[in-house]
Amino acid sequence: MNLYAKTHNPTPITRRDLAFSPNLEPWLYVVVIAIAQFMYIESYVIGSAALCYGLLVWLLYRGCYHPSPTQGRLCLSLTVVPVVRIVSDAVLPMELPNVWYFVVADGILFISGITITRVCGYSLKNIGISIGKHFWIIPFIILSGWLVGWFESQITSRAPLINRLTFADVWFTAGVLIICTGFVEEFIFRGILLNSSVDALTQRWGILFSTVVWGLLTATWLSWEQVLVISCTGVLWGAIRHYCQSIIPLSLAHGLANFMLFVVFPNLHK
Amino acid sequence: MTVTQVSPSVADAVNSQSVVLGTMLILCLVLLLIFKEILTTASANMNLTRLSRALRLIVTPLALALLFTMAAQFIRAGVV
């Protein structure tokens, strides 16, 4: 299903194809995402959704017809951004209890991520699902998750996901948060999106690009301080992803951060 | 720190507009499926095949999202 492997005879680049500068084009999409997110947090939900659908169709078209395969892959990878908004809007009204919301929403995103991986022709190693290297750094990465969770809990107050800290509830919630929010989001943002943006832009700009997109998507908690903390975390984890060549420790760190944020600190502050 | 969770005030706005959002989702999905069928029948061109395949990328999560939107509406209406 790799769409780019079959392009034996690429069409020559025309002047029309270069209407957007290749390095500028992804940043224009970031501006559109920022506008959509701003409308969303200002409760213009329908306008934001319309913008997301428009962006989705455009990215799909652009990803398939882009003269540069790397830019095309980046466009296809970015389709996950409007999908995140559409999926969360679809699942929200169900008012699923506790962690089941994450199971459903992130489950759909995982399916979307697998499809993007197949369409773009990425291997597991490309997207960081491997043992990786530099194992000595793993404890520090996981510790960074604890620190991020603590920072965020100082900025925003959230209702605890579970009120009774029984052994079974704690382990189930921790497992769901590590797999659904930790692994799936790292798979999408540090796996697919970071890989395609580093290919299309440079390593430095690629890390920054994926971080900005991730940060913008988390702006829905109406806290710009939180966006700042998450953006700094994104830069750090993006750099670590390139150093370690694996998203597995980052998934653990992300899951731990959410566990601290949604379970441990809210129960401590009760 | 998760991209799918939203603040309570935004969640209220989404819940109040869920019918319109669901309708938009259905329209988008139907249009994409029609588009996909048209492209699949005219797939002599390589680029068209590529677009047709990539449409699956979008149709799968949107179809699942639609399923959950409809389920939410049924639950709210007291059918389930």
Image (cartoon, helix red, strand yellow):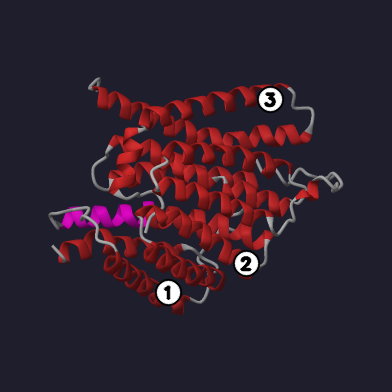
User: Compared with residue A16, is residue A162 higher up or lower down, i.e. above or below?
Assistant: below
Q: Nearer the viewer, residue A41 or A2?
A: A41
Neighbor class of circle 1 (other Cα within 10 Å; few <14, some 14-19, many 20+) is: some
- Measured as percent of width and height from the top left, residue A66 is found at 74, 46
Instruction: Say which residue label 1 marks.
Output: A138
Q: Earlier in the sequence, mark 1 or mark 2?
A: 1
| Amino acid on which the number 2 mark rests in the picture | Trp
On the same chain, marks 1 and 3? The answer is no
| Amino acid on which the number 3 mark rests in the picture | Thr
- Measured as percent of width and height from the top left, residue B28 is found at 53, 29
Neighbor class of circle 3 (other Cα within 10 Å; few <14, some 14-19, many 20+) is: some
Disc 2 is placed on an element classified as helix
Residue A29: give its label.
Answer: none
Q: Are marks 3 and 2 in contact (CB under 8 Å)?
A: no
Give the main secondary structure of the magenta stretch. Answer: helix
Q: Residue at x 58, y 42 (%)?
A: A55
Residue A205: give its label.
Answer: 2
Instruction: Please report, as a chain letter, where disc 2 is located.
Output: A
Instruction: Verify whether residue A175 appears in magenta.
Output: yes
Instruction: Say which residue label 3 marks.
Output: B40
Which mark lies nearer to you, 3 or 2?
2
- Measured as percent of width and height from the top left, residue B75 is found at 26, 27
The range drawn in magenta is: A167-180
What separation in Å lies between label 3 and label 2 (alpha carbons)? 37 Å
| Amino acid on which the number 1 mark rests in the picture | Ile
